[in-house]
Image (spheres, helix red, strand yellow):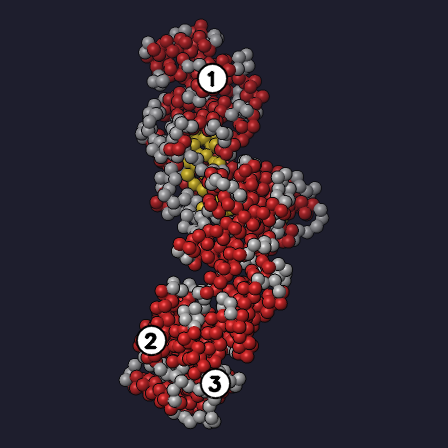
Amino acid sequence: MADNLRALFSSNDPSAFDVAEAFTDRNHQWAVVAAALEEHLRRVAGGSIDVEDLEAPRTNVIVFHGVGGIGKSTLLRKIEAALTAAEHRPEQWGAPTWTDRVLPIRIDLSRAASTGSDFERVILTIRLALAGALHRTVPSFDVALRHYWEHVHPGEPLDEYVRRSGLAGRFANLLPGQLQAGVGEVAAALALPGLVGSAAGQLTTALVSALRERQERARALAGATRTAALLEATPDLEALSYYPHLLAWDLDQLPAKKRLTPVVLLDTFEDTADRHRDFERLLQRLVWLLPNAFFVIGGRSRLQWADPALHGQLDWTGPTAWPGLAAAPSSLTVPQPRAASSGARQFLIGDLSPEDCEAHLARRLVQDGQPLIAADIRAAITARSHGLPLHLDLAVSRFLEIRRTGRTPTAADFDCTFPALLARTLSDLTPEERHLLRSVSLLDAFDLELATRTAGLTQQALARRLVERPLVTENPYALWPYHLHRAIRSAVRDDEHSDDRWTPADWHQAATRALAALGDQWTKAAALAPSRMLLVACLRQGLRLARDHGLTGLGWLIEAAFVYTDDSVWEPLALAADTEAPDTPADAVAELLTAIARRQREHRQRTADRLTAVLDTGLLPAELTEMALYYRAKAHKDLSQNDAARTGMQQVADADGRLAVKARRALANLARLAGDFPTALAAVPTLGWKGRHHRVLGDIHWSQADTASAVAAFEAGRAEAEQHGAAGERAMMQVRLALAVSFADPARAADELALAHQLLDGLDQRSNTLLAQVVALIKDAGTSDVTTRAESLRTDIEAAGLPFLHRFVELALAFHHAARDEDPDLAATIDRLRTLTATGDFAYFTDIAHFMAGLPLPELSTTRWTRSEDDVRSAWRGLVQARQEHLLAGN
């Protein structure tokens, strides 16, 4: 309603548009309340709640907690309205199944805290609500309350206090009269009518005496076992906190037609927080001593009453006392299966879905039956809000403010955060917690150690306290379990208004600490047991921090970059696009690794261009300059620009750095591609594991139709990769193993290919994935649909920017046509191969196609094999003949 009025008074022409209360569906929360309340009412009606049993566990409370602005107060107001009258219940909420009478009483604890009256105000609010609902006294409680009032507020009439304190409502005038009537009932029961107008103390003394003497009429009015003891106690705030026990007894004694169940909604429970939990302790007594009432609590943090560690600070603690409030084995921020959480009484209010945000904004302001806020603006607000209702309401206010200036709002006007959102977040944080909050806002995700190190702290206690707040979301299954709510994180990072906002130097120092903490975490973990997941996660956060804050200490990032590229897995580093050219070393490193990682998803020419641009900046450290040269040369090779590839690889090899061995392997492969097999073979002994010697050897053997030797080399390479935990290399070896056997043994090739796909799953190796499709063509050579599949594969290869693979497709087709004796198709395939290998690289594929068909070479070949040309010719022709026999056998 307040938002409606704010919008109404934002324009000189309020009739120009309609302001609607756009309550977003909270169906699940209502269902939770309705189910818990129905269960509570059933227990009350069945007599299973003994108001004098102070040891039985309590299940009469349900808690909704969530970050400020998530909609807790709105939800509680809607629950209050829905319980008050059916016409106020949102249409999407189902009708309640109970018929018992309930009395909703919503209490804003922030108001109680601001007045200083706190608990007294809460008690009076409940009694005032009962005055209007019951229209009768609750004798034992009323006598105690009057006794308290005269002791604590001597000479101050209750009705005057009620009016002055802002509690006055339509039933305010009833309470003093009902208290007086209660006194009269007690005086009449004691047969002491002269005490009606006397001081409360005299009546209380008389009632206590009567109860001690077990007078039947006195016990009928105030017969709770502990009534006399409570009335004898000094009537101060401490005693008042136990009077709800008398109220529970009075409510339990009501005639059946008068019975009702109070539903007390305690809003903004976070405002009860203090160092010693004094106010919270009084409120807990209220809940415990009124077991026949039902409580709905809304606050920013989980209610900790089930935590045994609070023993001594609160009266009743631990999971036995509050079974519904006990933390689940996994975090309560992780959605649990509904069937498994039926006994839970504590729920996180999550963000709104994009669909809910859209619906909220569309219904909020309406003009001529249509949403006043345009669709593109609604989409921009929704994206920026990350589902936080407060952000939506603030955006609506901004929309009206812009319209008031005479300008039409645009989507760009809402690419912002709101100071009010940050103010709400920071309001209940200590200065130390605000410092920590700003520190962790630098991180996409964090654990306690990372948060503590980033903030420059020495102890984790502050971080542990922060992660218990709902502005931090927990995923216990993640590498780093905690992350800030995204809308709050954006607001913290964009803060330019708060008094204690950070300077650029503050952010730079915190980013430096964060980068160092990430490096230490990865370095220590790698020394014990290398983790690819941790490596990539640290790189993602570290590169972003270094780039966004212009950090210079890149030491561990350089080492991590080499480890990342070493295994050819290529997980996306997911850095946000930077449209400006690199102007710091951190920018250059981030662009280098992004270009290398994205080469599996971009055309290789784009990769070569990006790497050239990075090299031209001259900003890369020397070691990473070598990396850029190496991967640019690889891109040139994939683009069939082999002269450029040889030049680049020779540069890296001559530098004799960390990638020199890999460069020498690449040069050996380039020699093979040029048809110089002896030179390639001579390089194998110098390569070792780092130079992937088995891969180079296997490629030499399968190209000469030496299947057995190729299989042995690839199997050895796969085993070596497994020994080193190199998943990328293992998958690469498996694809080549399938390639080697695909010509000779289709049945085994099917098994090897299935394993290859399994090993490639989860790896971003585009060229090997496409090569595996070529292997499938070779395996199926001689069958009917090979040419159709080859045409589709050509399209995929072209899109990937991997033209070298076109030669493999044509080689597969040559094998296919030779096996089927399709001479015209084979001749066309050989012509295409000759065109594709005109530069001299892969020219031996044209020779192999002739060998397969038993055709003479049209001219002298430049290929130098490691064995005689006749042996190679015979081996390839033998593979074709074996396939023909396989097909004739009906396979």
**Which residue was labeled with disc 1?**
236
Residue 761 appearing in the image: no
Query: Label 3: how many residues lie within 10 Å, few (<14), some (14-19) or many (20+)?
Result: many
Q: Position of residue 150 (x, y in %)?
A: 50, 13
Foreground label between 2 and 1:
2
At numbered mark 3, what does the secondary structure look like: helix, strand or loop?
helix
**Which residue was labeled with disc 2?**
712
- Placement of 509 over or under 620, stated as above or below: above
**Which residue was labeled with disc 3?**
843
Q: Are marks 2 and 1 in contact (CB under 8 Å)?
A: no
Q: Amino acid at mark 1?
A: Asp
- Placement of 333 over or under 546, stated as above or below: above
Q: Position of residue 210 (x, y in %)?
A: 36, 9
At numbered mark 1, what does the secondary structure look like: helix, strand or loop?
loop
Residue 137 falls left or right of residue 17:
left
Residue at the top extreme, as displayed: 194
Of label 2 and label 1, which has the lower sequence position? Answer: 1
Q: CA distance from mark 2 to mark 1?
A: 90 Å
For the C terminus, the image quarter is bottom left
For the N terminus, the image quarter is top right
Of label 3 and label 2, which has the lower sequence position? Answer: 2
Residue at 37%, 83% in the rendered image: 705
Of label 1 and label 3, which has the lower sequence position? Answer: 1
Q: CA distance from mark 3 to mark 2?
A: 26 Å
